[in-house]
Image: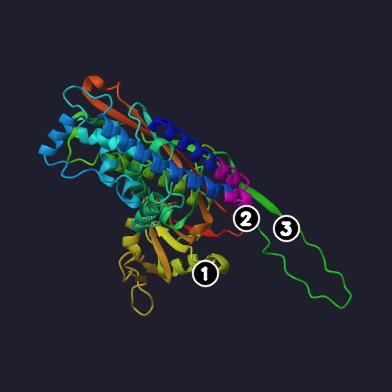
Amino acid sequence: MTVKELVDQRVKVAADARAMLDAAEKEKRALLAEEQAKWDMLMGEIDKLADRIERQEKAEREERMTAVERELETSKGRITEPLRPKPKDQRDQPTAEERALAFRAWARVPVSDEYPHTEEELSAVERCGMNLSKKQVILRLLPQQPRTIAEVDKGLEKRAQGVATGAAGLFTVPDEAMRPLEVALLAFGGMRQGATTIRTGGGADLPIPNVNDTTNKGLILAENTAAAEQDLVFTQLVLKAFKYSSKMLKVSVELMQDSAVNLAEFVGNALGERIGRILNDHFTTGAGTTEPKGIVTEATSAFTSAASTTVSADELIDLQYSVDLAYRMNPGAAYMFNDATAKIIRKLKGGDGQYIWQPGMIAGQPDFLLGHRVIINQSMASLATTAKGVLFGDIGKYWIRDVMDITLIRLDERFAEAHQVAFLAFSRHDGRLLNAGTNPVKVITQI
C-alpha cells in the first residue's frame, strides 16, 4: 500500500474511534465493556498503521534519492552513516521545531518565487502529515480546562502520547498554536481560574439539571408507620454555544519568512488574547439571550454599600456571611474584583490594626482575604455609584462551556496586493451560573 492509502486507512480508524467516544458522550455514559474492547483494538490498529506509514515513507524517500544526490548530501556532512530505523519513541511524534516549521509553511501558502518553502519546511510538512492545500486547520483545546500554565504543558504532554491526532496529523501541528492560545485564554481575566469549565466535542444545547431541596428534612417515624413521600423538584439550565470570532489578523509575508519568529506562537497568542478578552467580559457581565449570562448579572445583591467609591472591612465580612454556609465553605468560594478595587481593599485593617489581606507566600498560590482566596478579574466594574464591584461566593457554580474545536482559517488571496496573509479564528462558548434558588454568589451594590 502507498503512504496515502495507509494514511487514509489510519484516518478512517481514528474517525471510527472518535465516533464511538462521541456517541458515549452524547448519551452521558462511559464506554460499555464491548465498546472498550473495540476501542483498545482500534488503538492498537492505529499504532500499527503509524509504524507502517513511517517505514513506507522512509522507503519511498530512499527510492527517490539518486546516487548523485546522496553523494552530495554526504559531502555536506548531512549523511555520515547509513540510515537506521529510529527507536519507536523517537519516530512516533514530530518535534516541536518540526511542528513550528510545518505551521509556518502552511501559513505562507501560496508562496512566491521570492519566498519559496525551504527544504526544512517541506520535510517538516511531510513529517507532520500537514496538507498545505487546506485553507483551514482545527485547534483542538485540551479536554480539561487548565488552571495554570504548568497544567497546559502537562495536558499537551499527555495528548502527545495519544493517537487521536486528527486527519493525517491535522491536530499535531496546531498544537504549537494551541498552547499559547490556551495560555492566553487562561491569563485574560479571572473567570476561568475559578469557574467550572466543561469541554464538549459538539455544540448542541447542553441541559444541566438544577434542584433545590434545602427546605426538605428527614422524618422520625413511630413503629409500623409508613414513610412520607417527598419528590425532588428539578429545574433546567441550558448551555448553548455562541459563536465568537477573533477578527482578522493580518501578517506580512516577510514576518512569516523570518526564521526568528515562532509564527504558531505569535498567531496562537494573538487569537487567544482577542477571544479571551471578550469571553471574560461576557462571562462576567454578559446579558444572556444572545451571549453568555455573566456571573455578576446572575449574582444576587447582598446589600447596598454605605459609600460609592470604597468598601469597608465590615462590609466585606457582611458580604461573606450573606452567602449560605454550604457555599461559603466550598473550595470554590472566593472574592472577585478588579485590580483597582484590590488596591483599595489591600489598605483595609481589622480591629487589631492588621491588614485583612494576606498575600500568598508561595509562588502560584493566590492571595487571601478574610480566609478566602482572591481572584482578580479586570472585567469587574470599578467602585462607583450603582456599580457592582465586589463579588463573593462559590465561583465554581459558574459553568463555562467550550466547544473543543477552534477553526483557524487562512486568507491568502484577499490581501495579496499588500503582500499579507490574514488569519481568522472561530470558536463557540457559553456560560451560566447554576442557581436553584439558594444564591451561591452575591455582590455588593455601591450606593
Magenta region's main secondary structure?
helix
Question: In which quadrant of the rendered image does the N terminus lie?
Answer: top left
Spatial CA distance of label 1 from label 2 is: 18 Å
Residue indicated by mark 3: 232
Of residues 29 and 413, which is closer to you in this image?
A: 29
Q: Where is residue 178 in the image (x, y as percent from the top left)?
A: 36, 44
Residue indicated by mark 1: 329
* Residue interval drawn in magenta: 19-37
**Quarter of the image holding residue 148?**
bottom left
Residue found 35% across the figure and 71% down from its top: 358
**Quarter of the image holding residue 412?**
top left
Residue found 63% across the figure and 50% down from its top: 34
**Label 1 CA crowd tier, 10 Å (few <14, some 14–19, many 20+):** some
Q: Where is residue 430 in the image (x, y as percent from the top left)?
A: 50, 43
Spatial CA distance of label 1 from label 3 is: 24 Å
Q: Which of marks 1 and 2 is nearer the N terminus?
A: 1
**Quarter of the image holding residue 147?**
bottom left
Q: Earlier in the sequence, mark 1 or mark 3?
A: 3
Residue indicated by mark 2: 436
Q: What element carries label 2?
A: loop
Residue found 35% across the figure and 50% down from its top: 88
User: In this rendering, is residue 431 above or below 305?
Assistant: above
Q: Which mark is in front, 3 or 2?
A: 3
- Specify the amino acid type for callout 1: Met
Spatial CA distance of label 3 from label 2 is: 12 Å
In magenta segment, residue 176: no
Question: In which quadrant of the rendered image does the C terminus lie?
Answer: bottom left
Q: Earlier in the sequence, mark 3 or mark 2?
A: 3
Q: Is mark 3 on a helix, strand or loop?
A: loop
**Label 2 CA crowd tier, 10 Å (few <14, some 14–19, many 20+):** some
